[in-house]
Each structure stands twice: as C-alpha cells, then as structure tokens.
Amino acid sequence: MLRIAVLCGLLFINGWAKAENEPYNRADFQVDAAREVANDLLIAVMSADIQDKQPARIVQQLNATVNDALKKSAAFKTVKLSSGNQNTYPVYGKNNQIDAWRGHAEIRLESRNFKDAGELIMQLQQNMQLGNVQFALAPDTRTQIENALITEAIKAFQMRADAIRAAFGATSYKVVRLSISGAGIPPYRPNMAMRAALSESAIPAPEFAAGDSRISVQINGTIEMQ
C-alpha cells in the first residue's frame, strides 16, 4: 500500500509540474501589408518558323535569323537578348511520308526601357513574329518593395499584439512564434488584341501599358500575455 501511495504521489507531482509548464494566455493572429506597384520589366518572346525540303537549310536560315537579331540588339544597350528553344521536325504528307521539314527558333527579350524594347521588336519583326509579351517586377524592385512591406507588417504586428495585451489586461507580452511570408500576382500579360496588333510588321514601334503587380507580406505569430 505504501508503494502504491508513493507512486500515486509521484504521478501527481509530475502531472502538476507539466501543467505548470504548459503555455497559457496565448493568442495567434495574422497581419498583412500590401502595395500595388507598377511593373518595370518587359519580357517578350519572338520566334521564326521556316519550312524546307532540306533540314540543313532550315538550320542555316534559323541560325542566320537569330544571329541577325543578336546583331541588331547590340545597338540597344538597355535590352537583354538571349536565344531560346530551337528545333527541327518532319512534316508528314500522304502515306505517312516526310514531305518537308519545319524549323522553329525563339529569342527572349528583357528590358526596363519599354521604348527601346518596342523599337527593337519593330526591327526584328521583319524576320520574326512576336509570340508573347508579359510584364513583371524586376527582381531587385520586388526585393526592395518586400523589405519595405516587412517593416510595415512588423509594426502592424506590434500594434495588434499590444491591443490584444491591453484587452486581456496584461502588463506585457512576449513573442512565442513569428513567421513571415510573401505573395505576388502572376506577371501581367496583354490581351490577345494587343498581341495581334503588335504582330503587324508595318506599324510603328509599339507603346506598352505595363500594368501593376500587387505585392503582399503576411506575418503569422503567437504571443503570450504576462
């Protein structure tokens, strides 16, 4: 009986100690900071398609077109040009026989100077087609905005935490857990009508409307009132 009593006493003390260490007076909440920011980076993809009986001639013509685009881009220091996908594939006719070969090559343009990008696109449209245009925030711009939003969100978190502390009648609080995350909308893409207009070779250099991106930062945290 004595051993049983001692064992029960130890269990009670252990349970009491755990209860004393368990958290209490804690609150979980989230705050957000967001901003609409004008997109400052244009990304465009242009392509060339050639069909011929001889695949070697296709490769030569595609290489010549891409090389010509790279040469023309040298005059536009604010535009970054890079070669993209390039492939050749057969075109089948009757009886599943190869009638010809078709080649496809792409180049990618990136620039913060929309005027220069439009001028270069206009020149390249003599031999290439504009397949895609989208606008986004440049990486350094996004980082700068996110850093500013983190500061705003932390201030908002502190104000919310102090309001919760006051509502509970506590004298102070401590931060138990804090996590920061961010989000942004996908890059802005012009509508199909705009892309079709840009594909006309006889038009002046296009003027772009870059749109905005919404950048947000969320802070999730837990505080303990004291």
Image: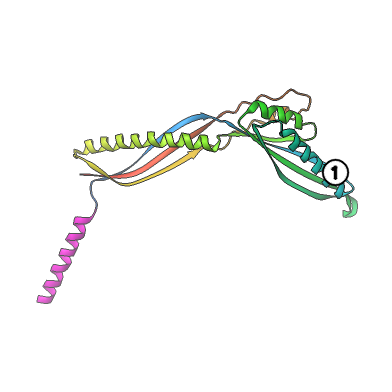
x and y, in percent, of residue 142 in the image = 50, 36
Could you say which is closer to the camera, residue 53 or residue 138?
Answer: 138
| Residue 1 visible somewhere in the drawing | no
Dividing the picture into quadrants, the one containing residue 12 is: bottom left
Colour approach in the figure: rainbow
Magenta highlight on residue 20: yes
Most extreme residue toward the top is 204
* Front in this rendered view, residue 36 or 22: 36
Q: Quadrant of residue 133?
A: top right
Of 166 and 52, nearer the camera is 52
In x, y percent, where is residue 165?
23, 38
Tell me what residue is drawn at x 66 percent, y 25 percent. Answer: 115
5 relative to 176 in the view: left or right: left
Going by the image, does 54 lie left or right of 145?
Answer: right
x 71%, y 40%: residue: 107
The kind of secondary structure element at disc 1 is strand
- What residue lies at 75% left-to-right and 39% top-to-bottom? 47
Q: At which x and y percent is residue 196?
A: 72, 30
Q: Residues within 10 Å of mark 1 (few under 14, many from 20)?
A: some
- Does 211 sit left or right of 161 as displayed? right
Q: Amino acid at mark 1?
A: Gln
Q: Which residue is mark 1?
A: 51
Q: Tell me the quarter of the image containing the N terminus.
A: bottom left
Total residue callouts? 1
Q: Quadrant of the C terminus?
A: top left
Residue 45 appears in view: yes
Residue at position x 57%, y 34% in the image: 136
Which segment did they paint magenta? 1-22
Q: Position of residue 28 (x, y in %)?
A: 32, 44
Question: Is residue 6 part of the magenta span, yes or no?
Answer: yes
